[in-house]
Image: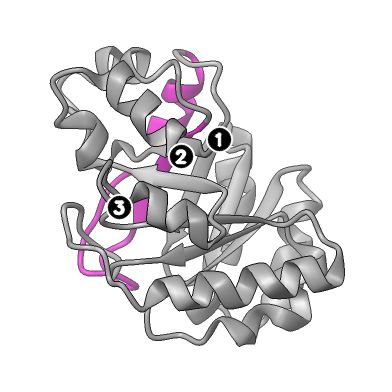
Amino acid sequence: MALIAPSILSADFNNLEKDIKAISSADYVHIDVMDGQFVPNITIGPVVIKNLKKITSLPLDVHLMIVKPENLIDDFRKAGADIITVHYEASHHLDRLIHQIKATDAKAGVSINPATPVEVLFPILELIDLVLIMSVNPGFGGQKFIPYTLEKVKTLKSKITELGLSTLIEIDGGVTTDNAKEITNAGVDILVAGSTVFNSNNIPATIQALKNA
């Protein structure tokens, strides 16, 4: 059964507490942090995450789409981030950054954009808890799934199995109840879904449908 991480990028920020409580049957809350530099959008910071921690017991899966993430790791961890995922493309010293995250007792993830080969992560797979494969170009919700990203999932899954690791594979972008089965069959463990969940007329039923994929 797939693990589900609804992305609050598509939630109603005028009534965020209501939407967070509506996804209580999910496995994580996925939080996209954007700075307007690494991606062409600006979202939220540690203050919002600190408030989210007060209204949900679900682990907070924080995806940093920002430049110089090393400057804010401690702030996000103190705010309540349980998983901190950084971008391969945003760091010149990825090994150091992973160790910085692990030193806070948070789980460490690394994300790659659609055009980045997954093989670049092979040297550090044993260091991280999660790989987040972007299946859209990061920055905005509601985009269509990029099919070739599934080949990266399959390659990554094969390498994780070869090394005997427990590293989880997460995918973010264009995930729907229609393509969730194909995605999980490729080897994905965690489905990030924003508009599919929060635009649904029945959020719990949609989460369950994604899990059953």
Q: Amino acid at mark 3?
A: Asn
Q: Amino acid at mark 1?
A: Met
Q: Which residues are magenta?
A: 28-54
Binning the other alpha carbons within 10 Å of mark 2 as few (below 14), some (14 to 19) or many (20 upward) gives some
Helix, strand or loop at label 2? It is: helix
Check residue 31 for magenta coloring: yes
**What residue lies at 33% left-to-right and 43% top-to-bottom?**
193
In the rendered view, tell whether residue 198 sits above or below residue 37. above
Say if residue 168 shows up in the picture.
yes
Disc 3 and disc 2: Cα gap in Å? 33 Å
Disc 1 and disc 2: Cα gap in Å? 31 Å
Q: Quadrant of residue 49?
A: top left
Relative to 105, is 147 on the left or the right? left
Q: Which residue is mark 1?
A: 1
Binning the other alpha carbons within 10 Å of mark 1 as few (below 14), some (14 to 19) or many (20 upward) gives few
**What residue lies at 56% left-to-right and 81% top-to-bottom?**
118
**Mark 1 or 2, nearer chain start:** 1
- Residue farthest to the right, as pictured: 164
**What residue lies at 26% left-to-right and 32% top-to-bottom?**
197
Q: Toward the viewer: 213 or 63?
A: 213
Check residue 23 for magenta coloring: no
Q: Amino acid at mark 2?
A: Pro
Q: Can you give x and y, in whole percent of width and height, for residue 198 in the image?
A: 21, 30
Q: Which residue is mark 3?
A: 179
